[in-house]
Image (spheres, rainbow, N blue to C red):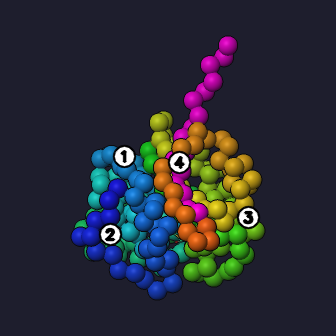
């Protein structure tokens, strides 16, 4: 999905601003008109605005009330439809989805605070992503997909374990001086034919 300069985004205090990871994830996304789409951890709402503009029936969620308000304001500024909820993962999110998108907090650090929550993923970088994936599996519509931004900062063994339940496909990657970021698409594996 191409970045659209005519979508007007205002950043908000104590909300993760659109960054390299945001744009890498955005570039790997595609949405079909009418698909039910969830952006978990919507931040400023740049990705949510693009998903809505692309015809997705959007639900955007963030644990940070300032992020939920920021996404609401950016959708409204651009006259784009979408539901926005303040939610700790799926606690206030109902229903099933064709596409779920998450740029999770992935740094392997323990830090607390409204803004720190945007990057602090606990000891292995998996504190938020692992429970997200456990619930997301049950919220996928048939043929649905989850698209994640991932980082070499996450503990690889813990990451592979959490992704083990899915069929995985790498959509994009970029190497930086100190880390690699990549985007993966996850789908429910087809049931194996019984011999
Ligand atoms: C790396 S930022 C990504 C923001 C935005 N999607 C982007 O790509 O620019 C991660 C976001 O996840 C949110 N977040 C962290 N823990 C969460 C949780 N348990 N439930 C929902 N959102 C969470 C943070 O508040 C933050 O806005």
Marked residue nearer the N-terminal end (3 or 1): 1
In this picture, which residue range is highlighted in magenta?
180-195
- Residue ID at (71%, 74%): 109
The residues tagged by marks 2 and 4 sit, at their Cα atoms, a distance apart of 29 Å
Badge 2 local density, few (<14 within 10 Å), some, or many (20+)? many
* Residue assigned mark 2: 75
Disc 4 designates what residue?
170
Report the mark closest to the observer, 4 or 1: 4
Vertical arrangement, residue 49 with respect to residue 69, above or below = above
- Please report the residue visible at 72 percent of the width from the left and 75 percent of the height from the top: 110
**Picture coordinates of residue 188, whole percent (x, y):** 57, 38
| Magenta region includes residue 190 | yes
Question: Does residue 163 appear in this view?
Answer: yes
Q: Residue furthest front?
A: 177
Q: Quadrant of residue 87?
A: bottom right
Which label was assigned to residue 124? 3
Inspect this view and state whether residue 138 appears: no
Quadrant containing the N terminus in the rendered view: bottom left
Q: Does residue 19 lie above or below 134 as drawn?
A: below
């Amino acid at each position: 999905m191409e970045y659209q300069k005519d979508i007007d985004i205002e950043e908000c205090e104590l909300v993760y601003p659109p960054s390299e990871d945001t744009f890498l994830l955005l570039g790997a996304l595609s949405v079909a008109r009418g698909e039910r789409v969830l952006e978990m951890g919507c931040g400023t709402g740049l990705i949510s605005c693009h998903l809505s503009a692309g015809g997705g029936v959007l639900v955007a969620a963030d644990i940070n009330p300032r992020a939920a308000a920021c996404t609401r304001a950016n959708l409204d500024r651009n006259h784009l439809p979408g539901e926005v909820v303040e939610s700790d993962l799926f606690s206030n999110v109902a229903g099933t989805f064709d596409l779920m998108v998450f740029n999770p907090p992935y740094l392997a650090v323990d830090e607390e605070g409204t803004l720190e929550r945007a990057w602090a993923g606990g000891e292995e970088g998996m504190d938020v992503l692992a429970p997200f994936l456990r619930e997301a599996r049950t919220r996928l519509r048939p043929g649905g997909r989850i698209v994640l931004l991932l980082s070499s900062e996450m503990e690889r063994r813990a990451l592979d374990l959490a992704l083990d339940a899915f069929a995985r496909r790498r959509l994009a990657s970029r190497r930086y001086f100190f880390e690699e970021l990549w985007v993966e698409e996850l789908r429910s594996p087809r049931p194996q034919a019984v011999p």
